Image (cartoon, rainbow, N blue to C red):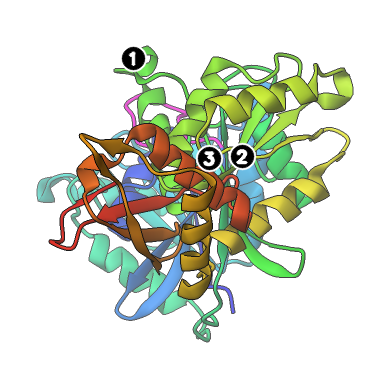
Amino acid sequence: MALPKVAVVGFPNAGKSTLINRLSGTREAVVHATAGITRDRKEIEADWNGRAFTLIDTGGVDAADESELAREVRRQARAALGEAAVVVFVVDAAAGAGPGDDELARELRAASTPVVLAANKIDDGRQVANAAELWSLGLGEPVAVSGEHGLGTGDLLDRIVGLLAATADPDDVEVTRLAVIGRPNVGKSSLVNRLLGEERVIVADFAGTTRDSIDTAIELDGRPVILVDTAGLRRRTKVAGTVDYYAQLRSERAAERAQVAIVLCDGNEGVTTEDMRVADLAMRKRCATVLALNKWDLGGGDLEDATSRVGNRLRQRPRLLAVSAQSGRGLRRLVAEALALADRAGERIPTPALNRFLSDLQSIRQPPQSHGRRLRMYYMAQFEVSPPRFAIQVNDRRLITRDYAYFVENRLREAYGLEGVPLVIDFKTSGGDRDR
Protein backbone atom coordinates (compact mmCIF):
# COMPACT_ATOMS: atom_id res chain seq x y z
CA MET A 1 0.00 0.00 0.00
CA ALA A 2 1.29 3.49 -0.87
CA LEU A 3 2.46 5.83 1.88
CA PRO A 4 0.13 8.73 2.78
CA LYS A 5 1.12 11.99 1.10
CA VAL A 6 1.70 15.39 2.69
CA ALA A 7 1.66 18.31 0.23
CA VAL A 8 3.83 21.30 1.15
CA VAL A 9 2.56 24.48 -0.53
CA GLY A 10 3.08 28.20 -0.28
CA PHE A 11 4.05 31.45 -2.00
CA PRO A 12 7.41 31.55 -3.87
CA ASN A 13 10.47 31.81 -1.62
CA ALA A 14 8.59 30.94 1.59
CA GLY A 15 11.26 28.31 2.33
CA LYS A 16 9.30 25.16 1.43
CA SER A 17 12.22 23.18 0.02
CA THR A 18 14.50 24.09 2.94
CA LEU A 19 11.80 22.99 5.37
CA ILE A 20 11.22 19.71 3.48
CA ASN A 21 14.94 18.91 3.62
CA ARG A 22 14.83 19.53 7.37
CA LEU A 23 11.70 17.40 7.92
CA SER A 24 12.99 14.50 5.80
CA GLY A 25 16.58 14.66 7.04
CA THR A 26 17.80 14.81 3.43
CA ARG A 27 19.06 17.32 0.87
CA GLU A 28 16.80 16.03 -1.89
CA ALA A 29 14.92 19.29 -2.56
CA VAL A 30 16.87 21.93 -4.50
CA VAL A 31 17.45 25.06 -2.39
CA HIS A 32 18.70 28.42 -3.71
CA ALA A 33 18.38 32.08 -2.78
CA THR A 34 16.59 32.74 -6.09
CA ALA A 35 12.79 32.54 -5.91
CA GLY A 36 10.92 30.03 -8.07
CA ILE A 37 13.57 27.28 -8.17
CA THR A 38 11.07 24.45 -7.51
CA ARG A 39 8.68 23.95 -10.42
CA ASP A 40 7.54 20.34 -10.58
CA ARG A 41 6.19 18.40 -7.64
CA LYS A 42 8.81 16.15 -6.07
CA GLU A 43 8.10 13.30 -3.65
CA ILE A 44 10.46 12.61 -0.73
CA GLU A 45 9.92 9.90 1.90
CA ALA A 46 10.04 10.89 5.57
CA ASP A 47 9.49 9.19 8.93
CA TRP A 48 8.52 10.45 12.36
CA ASN A 49 8.07 8.31 15.45
CA GLY A 50 7.72 5.18 13.35
CA ARG A 51 5.10 6.65 10.96
CA ALA A 52 6.32 6.83 7.37
CA PHE A 53 4.83 9.24 4.84
CA THR A 54 5.70 11.04 1.62
CA LEU A 55 6.35 14.78 1.49
CA ILE A 56 5.47 16.49 -1.81
CA ASP A 57 7.56 19.56 -2.57
CA THR A 58 5.77 21.99 -4.89
CA GLY A 59 6.57 25.17 -6.75
CA GLY A 60 5.60 28.54 -5.30
CA VAL A 61 1.96 29.45 -6.02
CA ASP A 62 1.58 33.06 -7.19
CA ALA A 63 -1.90 33.67 -8.60
CA ALA A 64 -0.88 37.13 -9.85
CA ASP A 65 1.78 35.71 -12.20
CA GLU A 66 0.08 35.02 -15.53
CA SER A 67 3.08 33.50 -17.34
CA GLU A 68 2.69 30.06 -18.88
CA LEU A 69 5.32 28.59 -16.55
CA ALA A 70 3.60 30.02 -13.45
CA ARG A 71 0.28 28.51 -14.58
CA GLU A 72 1.96 25.12 -14.99
CA VAL A 73 3.50 25.42 -11.50
CA ARG A 74 0.05 26.19 -10.05
CA ARG A 75 -1.43 23.20 -11.88
CA GLN A 76 1.25 20.90 -10.44
CA ALA A 77 0.70 22.28 -6.92
CA ARG A 78 -3.08 21.73 -7.19
CA ALA A 79 -2.44 18.17 -8.41
CA ALA A 80 -0.38 17.61 -5.25
CA LEU A 81 -3.25 18.97 -3.13
CA GLY A 82 -5.61 16.49 -4.79
CA GLU A 83 -3.35 13.55 -3.80
CA ALA A 84 -2.59 14.69 -0.25
CA ALA A 85 -3.95 13.37 3.04
CA VAL A 86 -2.57 16.46 4.84
CA VAL A 87 -1.46 19.89 3.57
CA VAL A 88 1.34 21.95 5.11
CA PHE A 89 0.90 25.63 4.18
CA VAL A 90 4.26 27.40 4.55
CA VAL A 91 4.27 31.16 5.09
CA ASP A 92 7.30 33.44 5.49
CA ALA A 93 6.54 34.72 9.01
CA ALA A 94 9.44 37.18 8.87
CA ALA A 95 7.78 38.97 5.94
CA GLY A 96 4.21 38.44 7.17
CA ALA A 97 1.17 37.24 5.21
CA GLY A 98 0.85 38.89 1.81
CA PRO A 99 -2.00 38.99 -0.74
CA GLY A 100 -0.74 35.77 -2.34
CA ASP A 101 -0.84 33.98 1.03
CA ASP A 102 -4.39 35.27 1.66
CA GLU A 103 -5.59 33.95 -1.69
CA LEU A 104 -4.03 30.51 -1.20
CA ALA A 105 -5.41 30.34 2.36
CA ARG A 106 -8.88 31.03 1.01
CA GLU A 107 -8.53 28.10 -1.40
CA LEU A 108 -7.28 25.79 1.37
CA ARG A 109 -10.14 26.76 3.72
CA ALA A 110 -12.62 25.71 1.04
CA ALA A 111 -11.01 22.25 0.68
CA SER A 112 -11.76 19.23 2.87
CA THR A 113 -8.10 18.23 3.38
CA PRO A 114 -6.74 19.09 6.86
CA VAL A 115 -4.17 21.91 6.83
CA VAL A 116 -1.21 22.63 9.12
CA LEU A 117 -0.04 26.25 8.97
CA ALA A 118 3.76 26.52 9.24
CA ALA A 119 5.09 29.96 10.18
CA ASN A 120 8.55 29.60 8.67
CA LYS A 121 11.78 31.60 9.08
CA ILE A 122 11.34 31.94 12.85
CA ASP A 123 15.10 31.60 13.28
CA ASP A 124 15.23 32.98 16.82
CA GLY A 125 13.04 32.39 19.85
CA ARG A 126 12.47 36.14 20.08
CA GLN A 127 10.67 36.04 16.70
CA VAL A 128 7.98 33.54 17.80
CA ALA A 129 5.52 36.41 18.24
CA ASN A 130 5.61 36.91 14.44
CA ALA A 131 3.82 33.58 14.05
CA ALA A 132 0.78 34.84 16.00
CA GLU A 133 0.03 37.35 13.22
CA LEU A 134 -0.81 34.43 10.89
CA TRP A 135 -3.98 33.58 12.86
CA SER A 136 -5.57 36.04 10.42
CA LEU A 137 -5.33 33.44 7.64
CA GLY A 138 -8.14 31.44 9.28
CA LEU A 139 -6.31 28.10 9.29
CA GLY A 140 -5.93 27.61 13.02
CA GLU A 141 -2.87 27.89 15.23
CA PRO A 142 0.37 28.50 13.31
CA VAL A 143 3.37 26.31 14.17
CA ALA A 144 6.50 28.44 14.52
CA VAL A 145 9.36 26.74 12.66
CA SER A 146 12.72 27.39 11.11
CA GLY A 147 13.58 25.23 8.11
CA GLU A 148 17.07 26.73 8.22
CA HIS A 149 17.86 25.98 11.87
CA GLY A 150 15.33 23.27 12.82
CA LEU A 151 13.44 25.23 15.50
CA GLY A 152 9.91 23.84 16.00
CA THR A 153 10.15 21.12 13.35
CA GLY A 154 9.43 18.39 15.91
CA ASP A 155 6.15 20.13 16.82
CA LEU A 156 5.29 20.42 13.12
CA LEU A 157 5.95 16.71 12.54
CA ASP A 158 3.80 15.83 15.58
CA ARG A 159 0.92 17.80 14.05
CA ILE A 160 1.36 16.15 10.64
CA VAL A 161 1.49 12.60 12.02
CA GLY A 162 -1.47 13.29 14.30
CA LEU A 163 -3.60 14.20 11.27
CA LEU A 164 -2.58 11.24 9.13
CA ALA A 165 -5.06 8.37 9.12
CA ALA A 166 -3.67 4.97 10.16
CA THR A 167 -2.23 3.27 7.11
CA ALA A 168 -0.78 -0.18 6.54
CA ASP A 169 2.89 -0.52 5.75
CA PRO A 170 3.58 -0.80 2.02
CA ASP A 171 4.13 -4.27 0.62
CA ASP A 172 7.75 -5.31 0.31
CA VAL A 173 7.80 -5.42 -3.49
CA GLU A 174 10.95 -5.05 -5.53
CA VAL A 175 10.69 -1.91 -7.65
CA THR A 176 12.75 -1.16 -10.78
CA ARG A 177 14.10 2.40 -11.05
CA LEU A 178 14.34 3.87 -14.57
CA ALA A 179 16.05 7.28 -14.87
CA VAL A 180 15.51 9.38 -18.01
CA ILE A 181 18.70 11.43 -18.48
CA GLY A 182 20.20 13.50 -21.27
CA ARG A 183 21.21 16.95 -22.46
CA PRO A 184 18.84 19.90 -21.87
CA ASN A 185 15.79 20.21 -24.13
CA VAL A 186 15.89 16.76 -25.76
CA GLY A 187 12.35 15.93 -24.55
CA LYS A 188 12.92 14.06 -21.27
CA SER A 189 9.86 15.50 -19.50
CA SER A 190 7.68 14.94 -22.58
CA LEU A 191 8.79 11.30 -22.66
CA VAL A 192 8.02 10.83 -18.95
CA ASN A 193 4.59 12.43 -19.33
CA ARG A 194 3.81 10.21 -22.32
CA LEU A 195 4.72 7.06 -20.38
CA LEU A 196 2.68 8.20 -17.38
CA GLY A 197 -0.33 9.18 -19.49
CA GLU A 198 -0.59 12.57 -17.77
CA GLU A 199 1.15 15.96 -17.57
CA ARG A 200 3.09 14.95 -14.46
CA VAL A 201 6.11 17.19 -15.09
CA ILE A 202 6.25 20.66 -16.61
CA VAL A 203 7.20 20.93 -20.28
CA ALA A 204 8.26 24.19 -21.93
CA ASP A 205 9.97 25.21 -25.18
CA PHE A 206 13.09 26.54 -23.46
CA ALA A 207 15.94 24.49 -22.00
CA GLY A 208 16.31 24.00 -18.24
CA THR A 209 12.63 23.74 -17.27
CA THR A 210 13.25 20.73 -15.01
CA ARG A 211 15.55 21.61 -12.10
CA ASP A 212 15.21 18.51 -9.95
CA SER A 213 14.90 14.74 -10.29
CA ILE A 214 11.21 13.84 -10.09
CA ASP A 215 10.30 10.30 -8.97
CA THR A 216 6.93 8.88 -9.99
CA ALA A 217 5.61 5.40 -9.17
CA ILE A 218 3.98 3.65 -12.13
CA GLU A 219 3.23 0.15 -13.37
CA LEU A 220 4.84 -0.76 -16.70
CA ASP A 221 4.20 -4.12 -18.35
CA GLY A 222 2.65 -5.38 -15.12
CA ARG A 223 5.57 -4.53 -12.80
CA PRO A 224 6.12 -1.66 -10.35
CA VAL A 225 8.54 0.98 -11.62
CA ILE A 226 9.88 4.29 -10.30
CA LEU A 227 10.23 6.58 -13.32
CA VAL A 228 12.67 9.44 -12.72
CA ASP A 229 12.67 12.64 -14.77
CA THR A 230 15.91 14.59 -14.42
CA ALA A 231 17.39 17.99 -15.16
CA GLY A 232 19.46 18.31 -18.34
CA LEU A 233 23.10 17.32 -17.96
CA ARG A 234 25.74 19.82 -19.04
CA ARG A 235 29.46 19.95 -18.45
CA ARG A 236 30.01 20.95 -14.81
CA THR A 237 32.30 23.81 -15.83
CA LYS A 238 29.37 25.41 -17.68
CA VAL A 239 27.05 25.42 -14.66
CA ALA A 240 29.51 26.06 -11.82
CA GLY A 241 28.16 28.60 -9.34
CA THR A 242 24.56 28.48 -10.64
CA VAL A 243 21.39 26.75 -9.47
CA ASP A 244 21.78 24.39 -12.43
CA TYR A 245 24.91 22.98 -10.75
CA TYR A 246 22.82 21.51 -7.92
CA ALA A 247 20.22 20.22 -10.38
CA GLN A 248 23.09 18.54 -12.22
CA LEU A 249 24.28 16.83 -9.03
CA ARG A 250 20.79 15.45 -8.42
CA SER A 251 20.58 14.14 -11.98
CA GLU A 252 23.87 12.31 -11.47
CA ARG A 253 22.61 10.91 -8.17
CA ALA A 254 19.40 9.75 -9.90
CA ALA A 255 21.52 7.73 -12.33
CA GLU A 256 23.48 6.33 -9.40
CA ARG A 257 20.27 5.06 -7.71
CA ALA A 258 18.67 3.69 -10.89
CA GLN A 259 19.06 0.21 -12.33
CA VAL A 260 18.60 1.51 -15.89
CA ALA A 261 19.26 4.88 -17.53
CA ILE A 262 17.33 5.84 -20.65
CA VAL A 263 19.71 8.31 -22.34
CA LEU A 264 17.53 10.52 -24.52
CA CYS A 265 19.04 12.20 -27.59
CA ASP A 266 17.57 14.66 -30.11
CA GLY A 267 16.84 12.74 -33.31
CA ASN A 268 17.27 15.90 -35.39
CA GLU A 269 20.87 16.21 -34.21
CA GLY A 270 21.73 12.53 -34.02
CA VAL A 271 23.92 11.10 -31.27
CA THR A 272 26.30 13.92 -30.36
CA THR A 273 29.56 13.89 -28.43
CA GLU A 274 27.67 15.28 -25.42
CA ASP A 275 25.15 12.39 -25.65
CA MET A 276 28.07 9.96 -25.58
CA ARG A 277 29.42 11.74 -22.50
CA VAL A 278 26.05 11.37 -20.72
CA ALA A 279 25.91 7.66 -21.60
CA ASP A 280 29.47 7.22 -20.34
CA LEU A 281 28.45 8.93 -17.08
CA ALA A 282 25.64 6.40 -16.65
CA MET A 283 28.12 3.56 -17.20
CA ARG A 284 30.49 4.99 -14.57
CA LYS A 285 27.56 5.16 -12.13
CA ARG A 286 27.16 1.37 -12.69
CA CYS A 287 23.83 1.90 -14.46
CA ALA A 288 22.57 -0.25 -17.37
CA THR A 289 21.97 1.98 -20.39
CA VAL A 290 19.77 2.25 -23.47
CA LEU A 291 19.93 5.19 -25.89
CA ALA A 292 16.77 6.63 -27.47
CA LEU A 293 16.66 9.02 -30.42
CA ASN A 294 13.64 11.23 -29.70
CA LYS A 295 11.67 13.34 -32.23
CA TRP A 296 12.23 10.65 -34.85
CA ASP A 297 8.84 11.45 -36.42
CA LEU A 298 10.22 14.86 -37.40
CA GLY A 299 12.73 13.24 -39.72
CA GLY A 300 15.75 11.63 -38.06
CA GLY A 301 19.12 10.81 -39.56
CA ASP A 302 20.76 7.50 -40.37
CA LEU A 303 19.88 5.11 -37.52
CA GLU A 304 22.27 2.42 -38.74
CA ASP A 305 25.20 4.83 -38.87
CA ALA A 306 24.36 6.22 -35.41
CA THR A 307 24.16 2.67 -34.00
CA SER A 308 27.58 1.86 -35.42
CA ARG A 309 29.15 4.99 -33.89
CA VAL A 310 27.61 4.24 -30.49
CA GLY A 311 28.96 0.68 -30.58
CA ASN A 312 32.44 1.92 -31.44
CA ARG A 313 32.53 4.69 -28.83
CA LEU A 314 30.85 3.17 -25.76
CA ARG A 315 32.22 0.11 -23.96
CA GLN A 316 28.77 -0.96 -22.78
CA ARG A 317 27.58 -1.15 -26.40
CA PRO A 318 24.02 -0.06 -25.54
CA ARG A 319 21.14 -0.46 -27.96
CA LEU A 320 19.94 2.61 -29.87
CA LEU A 321 16.19 2.92 -30.47
CA ALA A 322 14.18 5.50 -32.44
CA VAL A 323 11.21 6.94 -30.51
CA SER A 324 8.80 9.85 -30.45
CA ALA A 325 7.55 11.24 -27.14
CA GLN A 326 5.02 13.30 -29.10
CA SER A 327 3.32 10.43 -30.95
CA GLY A 328 4.30 7.53 -28.67
CA ARG A 329 6.10 5.69 -31.45
CA GLY A 330 8.64 3.14 -30.21
CA LEU A 331 7.95 3.74 -26.51
CA ARG A 332 6.60 0.24 -25.85
CA ARG A 333 9.78 -1.26 -27.31
CA LEU A 334 11.90 1.20 -25.29
CA VAL A 335 10.18 0.23 -22.03
CA ALA A 336 10.55 -3.48 -22.81
CA GLU A 337 14.28 -3.03 -23.50
CA ALA A 338 14.81 -1.01 -20.31
CA LEU A 339 13.06 -3.60 -18.13
CA ALA A 340 14.91 -6.46 -19.84
CA LEU A 341 18.20 -4.66 -19.12
CA ALA A 342 17.29 -4.43 -15.43
CA ASP A 343 16.56 -8.16 -15.41
CA ARG A 344 19.80 -9.10 -17.18
CA ALA A 345 21.85 -6.94 -14.82
CA GLY A 346 20.30 -8.81 -11.89
CA GLU A 347 20.87 -12.34 -13.20
CA ARG A 348 23.61 -14.69 -12.02
CA ILE A 349 25.40 -16.84 -14.62
CA PRO A 350 26.21 -20.39 -13.39
CA THR A 351 29.90 -21.04 -12.71
CA PRO A 352 30.13 -24.14 -14.99
CA ALA A 353 28.81 -22.08 -17.91
CA LEU A 354 31.35 -19.34 -17.24
CA ASN A 355 34.24 -21.79 -17.17
CA ARG A 356 33.15 -23.31 -20.49
CA PHE A 357 33.04 -19.75 -21.85
CA LEU A 358 36.56 -19.12 -20.53
CA SER A 359 37.91 -22.29 -22.16
CA ASP A 360 36.30 -21.45 -25.53
CA LEU A 361 37.62 -17.90 -25.30
CA GLN A 362 41.26 -19.00 -25.01
CA SER A 363 40.86 -21.34 -27.97
CA ILE A 364 39.38 -18.56 -30.13
CA ARG A 365 42.12 -16.07 -29.34
CA GLN A 366 45.34 -17.03 -27.61
CA PRO A 367 46.06 -14.93 -24.50
CA PRO A 368 48.99 -12.48 -24.68
CA GLN A 369 52.54 -13.31 -23.61
CA SER A 370 55.51 -11.31 -22.41
CA HIS A 371 59.18 -12.34 -22.09
CA GLY A 372 58.29 -15.88 -23.08
CA ARG A 373 55.54 -16.24 -20.45
CA ARG A 374 51.91 -16.55 -21.57
CA LEU A 375 48.80 -15.48 -19.67
CA ARG A 376 46.69 -18.41 -18.42
CA MET A 377 43.11 -18.01 -17.23
CA TYR A 378 42.16 -20.90 -14.94
CA TYR A 379 38.78 -20.22 -13.36
CA MET A 380 35.86 -17.78 -13.63
CA ALA A 381 32.91 -17.10 -11.32
CA GLN A 382 30.31 -14.38 -10.80
CA PHE A 383 29.95 -13.08 -7.26
CA GLU A 384 27.76 -9.95 -7.56
CA VAL A 385 24.76 -8.72 -9.55
CA SER A 386 23.39 -5.26 -10.50
CA PRO A 387 25.92 -4.71 -11.92
CA PRO A 388 27.34 -8.18 -12.65
CA ARG A 389 30.82 -8.68 -11.21
CA PHE A 390 33.14 -11.53 -12.15
CA ALA A 391 36.46 -12.88 -10.90
CA ILE A 392 38.94 -14.62 -13.22
CA GLN A 393 41.89 -16.42 -11.65
CA VAL A 394 45.07 -16.05 -13.73
CA ASN A 395 48.71 -17.09 -13.44
CA ASP A 396 50.05 -13.49 -13.53
CA ARG A 397 47.88 -10.40 -13.82
CA ARG A 398 50.83 -8.38 -15.14
CA LEU A 399 50.47 -10.30 -18.42
CA ILE A 400 47.00 -8.88 -19.06
CA THR A 401 46.84 -6.24 -21.78
CA ARG A 402 44.08 -3.62 -22.09
CA ASP A 403 43.23 -4.96 -25.53
CA TYR A 404 42.76 -8.53 -24.28
CA ALA A 405 40.75 -7.41 -21.24
CA TYR A 406 38.36 -5.57 -23.58
CA PHE A 407 38.19 -8.69 -25.77
CA VAL A 408 37.10 -10.76 -22.75
CA GLU A 409 34.51 -8.14 -21.77
CA ASN A 410 33.05 -7.83 -25.28
CA ARG A 411 32.79 -11.59 -25.77
CA LEU A 412 31.09 -11.92 -22.38
CA ARG A 413 28.49 -9.35 -23.46
CA GLU A 414 27.87 -11.16 -26.73
CA ALA A 415 27.60 -14.60 -25.11
CA TYR A 416 25.07 -13.60 -22.45
CA GLY A 417 23.20 -10.66 -23.99
CA LEU A 418 24.79 -8.07 -21.70
CA GLU A 419 24.95 -5.19 -24.22
CA GLY A 420 24.18 -2.01 -22.29
CA VAL A 421 24.96 -3.62 -18.91
CA PRO A 422 28.03 -2.42 -16.96
CA LEU A 423 30.42 -5.26 -16.13
CA VAL A 424 33.19 -5.48 -13.53
CA ILE A 425 35.85 -8.11 -14.16
CA ASP A 426 38.53 -8.73 -11.52
CA PHE A 427 41.65 -10.56 -12.69
CA LYS A 428 43.15 -12.23 -9.63
CA THR A 429 46.31 -14.19 -9.01
CA SER A 430 46.49 -16.96 -6.44
CA GLY A 431 48.14 -14.51 -4.02
CA GLY A 432 44.95 -12.40 -4.00
CA ASP A 433 46.25 -9.45 -6.07
CA ARG A 434 43.72 -8.20 -8.56
CA ASP A 435 43.26 -5.86 -11.47
CA ARG A 436 40.00 -4.59 -13.03
Q: Is residue 194 above or below residue 412?
A: above
Q: Secondary structure at mark 2?
A: loop
Q: Earlier in the sequence, mark 2 or mark 1?
A: 1
- Residue 183 shows in this picture: no
Q: CA gap, disc 2 to disc 1?
A: 27 Å
**Mark 2 Cα within 10 Å, few/some/many (few <14, many 20+)?**
many
Residue 430 location (% of width, % of height): 18, 63
The span from disc 1 to disc 3 (Cα, nearest Å) is 26 Å
Residue visible at 80% across and 44% down in the picture: 331
Q: Magenta segment, which residues? A: 30-39
Q: Which residue is mark 2?
A: 318
Q: Are marks 3 and 2 in contact (CB under 8 Å)?
A: yes
Q: Secondary structure at mark 3?
A: loop
Which one is nearer the viewer's eye here, 318 or 44? 318
Q: Which residue is mark 3?
A: 316
31 drawn magenta: yes
What residue sits right under mark 1 in the picture? 237
382 above or below 69? below
Q: For residue 329: magenta?
A: no
Using a 10 Å C-alpha cutoff, classify the residue at mark 3 as few (fewer than 14 neighbours), some (14 to 19) or many (20 or more).
Answer: many
Q: Which type of secondary structure does the marked residue at label 1 adopt?
A: helix
Residue found farthest to the front: 372
Amino acid type, label 2: Pro
2 vs 1, front mark? 2
Left-right relation of 371 to 414: left
